[in-house]
Image (cartoon, rainbow, N blue to C red):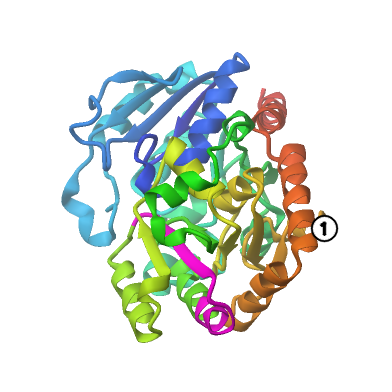
Amino acid sequence: MKILVVSPSYWPATDLGGPIFSLHALNKMLVKKSVDVTVYTTDIRLKGKVASNREAIVDGVKVTYFSFSPFFEFLGPTGWQFSVPMRKALEKNIKDFELVYILSVWNYPVIMAASVCRRFNKPYVISPRGLLCPWPFERKFFKKWVYYKLLAEKCIRKADAIHYTSSDEREKSHERLGLGNKVILVPNGIDLHEFNSLPLKNELVIKYPALKDKRVILFLGRINPKKGIDILIKAFSMLSKKRKDLRLVITGKDEEGYKSRIVRLIRKLRLQDKVIFTDMLLGREKLKVYAGSDIFVLASHSENFGMSAIEAMASGLAVVISDNVGIYRDVEENDAGIIAKTSAKSIYNGIMKLLEDEGLRKKISQNGKSFVREFYSIDKVADKMIEELEGILRVSR
């Protein structure tokens, strides 16, 4: 099988979020399973770090980072990514691929790739990665609704299939918008080998001595309004009044200056000496923060999947996640975490339950590790994706 993946951004532009990690992990595994994968993307956040407009091999995956026009930066932090070189390459080479997999919604590469596929009668799959869910869709609603009606809707409805990473995302997107496409329901996956040999717990304390003899509550992800970090901080403030042995670690990249608002809230609640910020961490440094923490919390308002929660479970952390995190039903059914509402009181109750009941915390930790190994191994996820894509090709032939 020979597929083309079109994505507005790609590895190693890691500061642009979870899909960067999950898509590259999937592509690497597909290549290992003898699928011929080519990626067309832009050089956003990578100018000067990658060669533009020519193919490179990235961890075994063929990737071309195309240059794009900066004229549309006013549309958002990543602009519209209008790329003439990408369009020309796709029109020239689309005949060489059996199927096109398109990630995202609100940018030029998606609209362009879908229209070229229709023109050349090439089957394609769109993966919105949560961007059609109500919370992100309703932010700047008028602008997005006009864009959806004028450009995106046709591309989405004409797709041979829509790929969702959780049943929650499918319900909030596919069913809410009345889409009739075939649904591919395949989760994100992680390479479990990375979590087989974690750093020692005290390695995080060596780097941050203020964590010595403390219970560490961790958030890891992008620092933006969607993630519910303000709710976590309010819950942590309530916890700190009950217990003096707690510290909160916030790990991630600031987006759109949102960190400054979080810092103001921390000062208002007088938590400055109890909250530690780190920048985004990768590789061994990320594993250190997982290994050195006690409880992971994701209080998101909207999350199509929840990659960091899966990684935390793979690391043996007990997790508290909101019922807006895409995997929450599966977590609940497998008793692999505590599910809370997106409110400070509910998050507080979830964390306190784990702090006060050591047996429950160990049980949740063990269940979480088993849960991830059963359902989210990248090897199993890739097999499922191959099966789904081959099914589309059989129908289209």
List x then y, in percent, for residue 194: 57, 32
Look at label 1 and name its amino acid: Glu
Q: Is 323 situated left or right of 83 in this image?
A: right
Residue 197 visible, this angle: yes
Q: Is 325 situated left or right of 372 in this image?
A: left
Quarter of the rendering containing residue 41: top left
Which residue reaches farthest top?
34
List x then y, in percent, for residue 86: 31, 31
Image quadrant where one finds the C terminus: top right
| Residue 384 belongs to magenta span | no
List x then y, in percent, for residue 240: 52, 79
Question: Which residue appears at 62% of the width and 67% of the height?
Answer: 324
List x then y, in percent, for residue 264: 31, 79
In the rendered image, the vertical position of residue 382 relative to residue 345, given as above or below: above
Question: Which residue appears at 40% of the width and 56% of the height?
Answer: 209
Please tell me which residue lies in front, 284 or 228: 284
Query: Which region shows up in magenta?
Result: 236-253
In the rendered image, the vertical position of residue 52 relative to residue 68, given as above or below: above
Mark 1, residues whose alpha carbon is within 10 Å: few (<14), some, or many (≥20)? few
| Residue 243 belongs to magenta span | yes
Quarter of the rendering containing residue 134: bottom right
Q: Is 229 situated left or right of 340 in this image?
A: left
The residue indicated by pointer 1 is 333
